Amino acid sequence: MAEIAEEGGGGHGKGKKRGKKPSARIDMTPMVDLAFLLLTFFVLTSTFSKPKTMEINYPAKPEPTDNIKPPEVKNGLTLILTKDRIFYYKGEFILPNDPKGRPATQLEETDFSINGLHKLLVDLNKSAIEEIKVLEEKAKRKEIPDTTFKRLVMEAKGKKEALTVLIKTDDQATYKNFIDVVDELNLAMVGKYVTVDMMPQEYELLKQKLGNQ
């Protein structure tokens, strides 16, 4: 609270002395108390930033079997990750001595550069990307509401023509490699991807590829 300290003024005798102005002293104690109360209130009621994480759901592990039939994937891409390296093949895995006379699958290598994995995914998922870009332009012009836009984007990513990616890893692959791949999939607007176990035939090809380099 403000207090006024008065001092004696005007004396006796000849002449009239001018009275001194009273000086004010402000007590800051209540304001300091209020500041600490407000600080405590905001600290207790604030929401602290939470670490950003990515939730990944892995499919159920299949029962072990000696007779594994390679899955048939239409417009598919299989990525095989090892330590800081990415190998891939397109479409169905074809075994040697194929009854239809098709050449056996061979692994190709790419990397995490913009002209590597990113370009590969964008080229293979071109139809979905172009469709989503058209939807984005319509959304900017307010021709479709946000809820409709999100639904149509999900439908575009899930079409048969859209790219399907199988991600497989060996025991040398790191979580960073895996997260980098998922980031590239999201940038390339790939909506269909799953992590599955590597087939023995794929593992043999990978060992041959690593052994020859």
Image: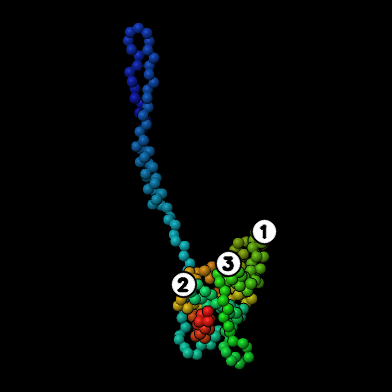
Indicate which label's residue lies in the foreground, 2 or 1.
2
Q: Which disc, if any, is residue 141? A: 1
**Rendering coords of residue 70 (x, y %):** 54, 85
Q: Secondary structure at mark 1?
A: loop
- Determine which quarter of the picture holds residue 34: top left
Looking at the picture, which amino acid does disc 3 mark? Leu
Q: Sort mark 2 into few (<14), some (14-19) or many (20+) by Cα contacts within 10 Å.
A: some
Looking at the picture, which amino acid does disc 1 mark? Arg
Indicate which label's residue lies in the foreground, 1 or 3.
3
Is residue 156 something one can see in this rendering?
no
Q: Which residue is mark 2?
A: 174
User: Which residue: 47% across, 88% down?
Assistant: 65
Measure how far apart labels 1 and 3 are at the Cα level.
23 Å
Looking at the picture, which amino acid does disc 2 mark? Thr
Q: Which residue is mark 3?
A: 187
Q: Which disc, if any, is residue 115? A: none
- Asked if marks 1 and 3 touch (Cβ < 8 Å), the reply is no
User: Which residue: 39% across, 46% down?
Assistant: 39
User: Which residue: 66% across, 62% down?
Assistant: 138
Q: Sort mark 3 into few (<14), some (14-19) or many (20+) by Cα contacts within 10 Å.
A: few
